[in-house]
Image: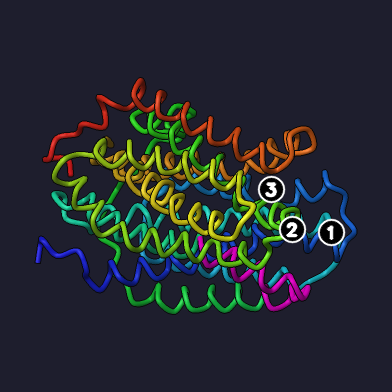
Amino acid sequence: MENKIWTKDFIIYSIINFLLILVYFLLNSTITTYAQIEYNASSKMMGLIAGIFIVGALIGRLFIGFFKITKKMFVINILFFALTTILYFIKLDETFLIIVRLLNGISIGVTTTIVGTIVALVIPEHRKGEGISYFAVSTALATGLGPFIGISLTQNSNFVNIFYISFLFGIVSLIFSFLINVPDNDNRKNLSFRNLLDKRTLPIGFIIFLSAFSFSGIVSYINLYAIEIDLVKTASFFFILYTMAVLFSRPFTGKIVDIHGPNIIMYPAFILFFIGLVMLSMSHHSWIMMLSAILIGLGFGNISSITQTIAISNANPRSVGLATSTFMIFMDLGNGIGPYALGFIIPVLGYSDMYKVLSLVVIFSIFLYIILNNKKAKYSQSNI
């Protein structure tokens, strides 16, 4: 039983994670369009409405490490998440929408950090890489399906249905939360500035920040890019192909990491991510864009899971919660800062050249990984 990954709790936590992350990307990929159509929001206001969600998630992740995780706490936070999704139905003004986004971001930041922390505790130590790779499939599925559903619905300005789906998934998550067990843990830190982040996680944190930054350019702008090059129909299936690539590779890559360490997967993943972005920048035919989706799925899809494995494996056993929180904070920063920063580049370079620039960011990430994480990434098998 100690060697088993697919326990009842592991499956339920994976389902809850899938639903929460799906809502995360469903809302983030459509909220700017909603703000523009429903509130006639300016570009700056749209950026604030989109970005304040990430600020909320960061707040939630930063402070969850100071509390002991219990089942009661978990259930209450998922209830809070479900309740904040109801607020989207209340249409007042832009200020109210900003407040709703902030609260919704805090709730999802707290709950996804709790889920990631508990999953790391229930996976057998010597199968960490394999277990986290399987768990990360739920994130990959949500990453692909969220924007796909959102973009499909916004083509008919069907925003209310987006809010209905978000609330429904919140309720389903709440129901599932009553069925799980929360293992005994006490990863609390004393409330101080130095305990906001886990120092051991910072090196790999910079890598996931740059990788998420690059991927955010795809999530936020591929629809507009597709309109420009007349490949809208192809773009709608981009994230489906991305997800299929991740689902195909994850079962193998996780086991390989457990046996040989992360570097054997990380370097090819970086290269595939780089090639995928270059191909995306040259997507004047459907097949090129579809192939880029597959390569990016094999690249970023595995980078995101393996970096999380490294973060947890390098953490002190009492700091798993803080390490998980720190890792997700850097990922959130990449997802949040990316679209805003790239918004300054697009008017100068255009979408195609923007993706070329992001491919160079990936190349830089390889060298940074070698410098900051290569030694740390060679964790002993006893840590896995």
Q: Amino acid at mark 1?
A: Gln
> Is the residue 340 above or below the residue 103 in the image?
above
Q: Which residue is mark 1?
A: 36
The answer to whether marks 3 and 1 mark residues whose Cβ atoms lie closer than 8 Å is no
- From the top left corner, tell me how far across and down residue 173 is, in percent: 46, 73
> Is the residue 196 above or below the residue 1 in the image?
above
Residue at the limit of the structure toward the top, as seen here: 371
User: Dividing the image into 4 quarters, which one contains the N terminus?
Assistant: bottom left
Q: Which residue is mark 3?
A: 52
Mark 1 residue element: helix
Looking at the rendered image, the disc whose residue lies closer to the viewer, 2 or 1, is 2
Looking at the image, which is closer to me, 318 or 18?
18
Q: Which mark is residue 227?
A: 2
Q: Amino acid at mark 2?
A: Ile
Query: Quick check: is 157 in the magenta stretch?
Result: yes
**Nearer the N terminus, badge 2 or badge 1?**
1
